[in-house]
Amino acid sequence: MTTQTATARGLPAPAGRSRRLRALWLLLTAAALLLFSALSVAIGTRDVGFADIAAALGGQVETIGQAAVAMRMPRTLLGLLAGAALGLAGAIMQGVTRNPLADPGILGVNMGASLAVVIGVAWFDIASAYAYIFTAILGAGAAAVCVYVIGSLGRGGATPLKLALAGAATSVAFSSLVIAVVLPRNDIAGGIRAWQIGGIGGATLERIYPVLPFLAAGFVVSLLSARKLNALALGDEMAAGLGEHVAVTRAVAAFGAILLCGATTAVCGPIAFLGLVVPHLCRLLVGGDHRWLLPFSALGGACLLLAADIVGRIVARPAELDVGIVTAFVGAPFFIWIVRRQRVRDL
């Protein structure tokens, strides 16, 4: 039995990265996540001491410093959830499409969710949190189907290059439609433009609670798809030979990613490139086995988003840069590097 066949069936690979090494990277990633979480609570426009942080964690808000920490805790929680969701969704999309350039932003999924929300606000006056979430998920799903159909046209089916081009074209088209919808509506233009940048500032528990069931469902569906994605990595014919229903496997895994992308976009706005960068970095550490890659991508996404948010608070003090701007600065050069290095090969 080959290494790839063993991996596809969920068996330990006879060669490659050992469990001990992967466990070490897991511990280091978890430690980095704890560090970034602590820094996210401690760093802001107002410097706070350890005593204020400890008191705020205990529920006290008697001083200005404690109140500042209390306001940062929901922001940190949202950063953890959104980063994990986007990192995991990126890994799922790369596995489903076998496309090294797959990413919720590049494939147009985030922009599809954004367009749906903007249309809902401008034309149907949606206002509740659940309306935002359902609308964003429907928009993300419609965009994913649209990109896959366009990328499947012509000879060769849905190749990585055609999917990337279809996603880029769809993103540009949806972005133009967003502008066209918002331009006549000065009453909502300011809020929509701020939301479109993508950020986690101003997070509250009231904003986070409605999105939790959708994120939980997305995490469960995505993580349970790990073994089946290992089979897809061998190619459709081999996966079918191993007893997998290829179309069903792709649809279920993609549904998990759409839930994660749509729910995250509804509460944070579209945040690009995080789902592209994180899975590639995690693949270098733990290899291509999705049983390890998916949870690592979730942890890595949370780390990167929190780190980007912290950088955004530091470089523009006393103002802030939204996290969507910081991830774009990191992700755009990484995207160019992947294109040059990978030459848009299949995974």
Image: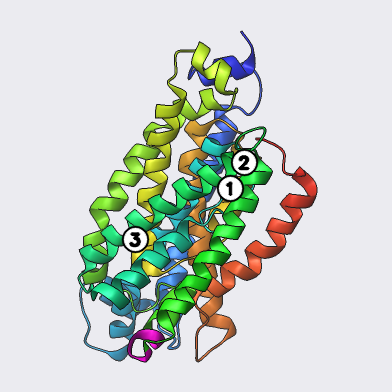
Characterize the local packing of mark 3: few (<14), some (14-19) or many (20 or more) Cα atoms within 10 angstroms.
many
Query: Looking at the image, is 21 positioned above or below residue 151?
Result: above
Q: Which residues are magenta?
A: 186-190
CA separation in Å, label 2 and label 1: 5 Å
Q: Front-most of 205 and 54?
A: 205
**Disc 2 designates what residue?**
99
Left or right of 84? Residue 304 is right
Q: Callout 1: 10 Å neighbours few (<14), some, many (20+)?
A: many
Could one spot residue 324 in this view of the protein?
Answer: yes
Residue type beneath disc 2: Asn
Q: Residue at x 50, y 58 (%)?
A: 303
Query: How far separated are the C-alphas under marks 2 and 3?
Result: 24 Å
Count of labels shown? 3
The earlier-in-sequence mark between 1 and 3 is 1
Residue drawn at (72%, 63%), measured in percent from left and top?
A: 333
| Quadrant assignment for the N terminus | top right
- Would you say the magenta stretch is mainly helix, strand or loop? helix
Whole-angstrom CA distance, mark 1 to mark 3, is 19 Å
Callouts 2 and 1 close, C-beta under 8 Å: yes
To which residue does mark 1 refer?
A: 102
Nearest the eye: 324 or 312: 324
Q: Is residue 106 above or below residue 284?
A: below
Horizontal placement of 200 versus 324: left or right?
Answer: left
Image: 62 above or below 304: below
> Residue, x 51% and y 46% (percent of image)?
297
Q: Which residue is mark 3?
A: 136
